[in-house]
Image (cartoon, coloured by chain):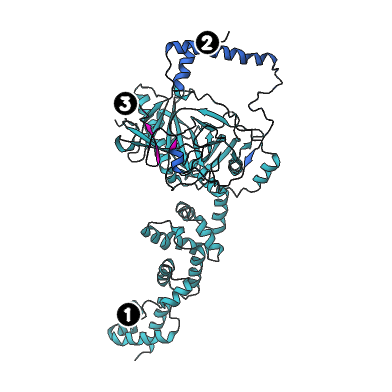
Chain colours: A cyan, B blue
Amino acid sequence: MKKAELMDYDKALELFEPVLGFEVHVELNTKTKMFCGCANEFGQGANTNTCPTCLGLPGGLPQVNAKAIESSIRLGLALGCEIAEYSRFARKNYFYPDTAKNFQTSQYDEPIAFNGQLTIELESGRLVTVDIERAHMEDDAGKLTHVGGQAGRIQGADYSLVDYNRGGVPLVEIVTRMIEGGEADSPEIGRSYVAAIREIVKGLGVSNARMEEGNVRCDANVSLRPRGSNILGTRTETKNVNSLRSVERAVRYEIQRQAALLAAGGTITQETRHWHEDTGITSAGRPKSDADDYRYFPEPDLVPVAPSREWVEELRATLPEPPAARRKRLQADWGFANLEFQDVVNSDLLDAVEATIAAGAAAQAARKWWTGEIARLANVAGVAAHSLVHPVQVAALIELVVAGTLTDRLARQVLEGVIAGEGTPLEVVELRGLAVVSDDGPLIAAIDEALAAQPDVLAKIRVGKVQAAGAVIGAVMKAMRGQADAARVRELVLERAGTAQ
Amino acid sequence: MSEITAEQVAHLANLARIDLSPEEINRLTTELGQIVDSVAKVAEVATPDVPATSHPMPLTNVFRPDTVVPSLTVEQALSGAPDHDGDKFRVPAILDEE
């Protein structure tokens, strides 16, 4: 595949205005599929969750999953949408082996939710309001594996294999209106928008929201309009961009690629493009053509969905605090500087820090432990920090430090013990005998011994060279196996040096 | 007389992945035209105050609970397919060689 010419990003923005649009598919985490009682789960063997309905066999009849409707309405409400009083399913007809029905059951001109808005905040603090055109329900397609071609590509494959476990899983597709005025922030707008959707569906609990497992998938539409023109350029649709970073990269790439083509007098083909995670480029998929004649018509096997206004209001009352508002409130409550707070958010530790503070820890201490030592250990272990240790244990650990039972250094050892499953912090302290020696008796004995062993140091301290005390403090800490409060040791060293023989 | 043309029938056949001979296209153009004409008669009695009907039953909100029911076994699922490979359906190459 030939690598396309790219225009310098700043230059591209000088010549053109990017116009964006996003379609985000969210897989709902219902127990069963959208129109049949097959389990909605993966990791099983292929084709273990299928039935005549999701395989499109003769006689199969769809039945709507009540929970999927509820989740779709809640998601619509969280996106500020109106909920349709009357909504229908429609058949989107196409022939492709990823659906055995030869159509996708979707919604056409009567989606469940429409006219929403989502305001996102960029790193610069700029607020961008994205208009949501619609959020509609549909079922997912099966999974294809192409055999015989290069690297599993469909081009050149000898044949393909199909697993229909995912076929029929409930999806909500969220479609934005055109996003203009994004300018240089356009790639970041893409990333932040998808991140905001992910956060919302996670907060609602309607999806597992794991992008790496395809629970949230983004198609990014990009077109360029020459400066001074009011005519929209031809757009491309980059499919299945499945990480936040990739959304940002794909938008940026398309801006640079299209700008180079247009500036050289070329034209943009309206087409779907594929994003290649490894090389960071998009490549042409199929052009929009006759095949996009989907001949939608109302699904004759399903009756309309007409949610009562009472039900909609009941569901509205179940919505959690919007994630952006929650962040604002937490940062104010905790008094974190922007960088400190961003650190927590970017490490996906908001819930963990909040729970630790709720369990009694001071906000700064909770932040320091989670983004510091716990994040470091999680990184070493290759797991998510919040999965490593329970917030209640972290709060208990912090309490021991505050009480003077542990120094930071000892607390790190206790943390390792807690993570290793040795018990609560207090149990680990006892088990490993790690508490700070707070009784001055043993400290004084160790200090006197160290001073006696280093008479030259003692002499220096006596003539006022107090920095010489470091050597003695070190020896004492070593003798105490680190289980002493260094500040107290220092006090005692100076005191004993003054009175020692 | 309907406005169904041979080109439309050929387009539809292509979308439906059905290989039709010119004779079949001609025959289907006539037949589909007659069907469209017959259906058009409905328009003669349907006044603007009659909403379009997609379902004969005046029902809404027919839902099932989100409860798992047993699926087919893999063997049952694959039994009607022309070909399979292990536990997956096997289909011919999707794209033509270019």
Boundaries of the magenta span: B79-95
Q: From the top left corner, tell me how far across and down residue A276 is, in percent.
A: 36, 37
C-beta proximity under 8 Å, tags 3 and 1: no
Left or right, A11 with respect to B12, comes to left
Label 2 vs 3, first from the N-terminus: 2
* Residue at the spot of label 1: A475
* Residue at the spot of label 3: B97
Q: From the top left corner, tell me how far across and down residue A119 is, in percent.
A: 55, 41
Give the letter of the chain under mark 3.
B
* Residue at the spot of label 2: B30
C-beta proximity under 8 Å, tags 1 and 2: no
Q: What amino acid type should be assigned to the residue bearing mark 3?
A: Glu
Give the letter of the chain under mark 2.
B
Badge 1 marks a residue whose secondary structure is helix
Q: What amino acid type should be assigned to the residue bearing mark 1?
A: Ala
Badge 2 marks a residue whose secondary structure is helix
C-beta proximity under 8 Å, tags 2 and 3: no
Q: Nearer the viewer, mark 2 or mark 3?
A: 2
Name the residue at 27% across, 84% down.
Answer: A456
Give the letter of the chain under mark 1.
A
Q: How far apart are marks 1 and 2 (CA)?
A: 104 Å
State the residue in front, A150 or A409. Answer: A150
Residue at mark 3 shares a chain with residue at mark 1: no
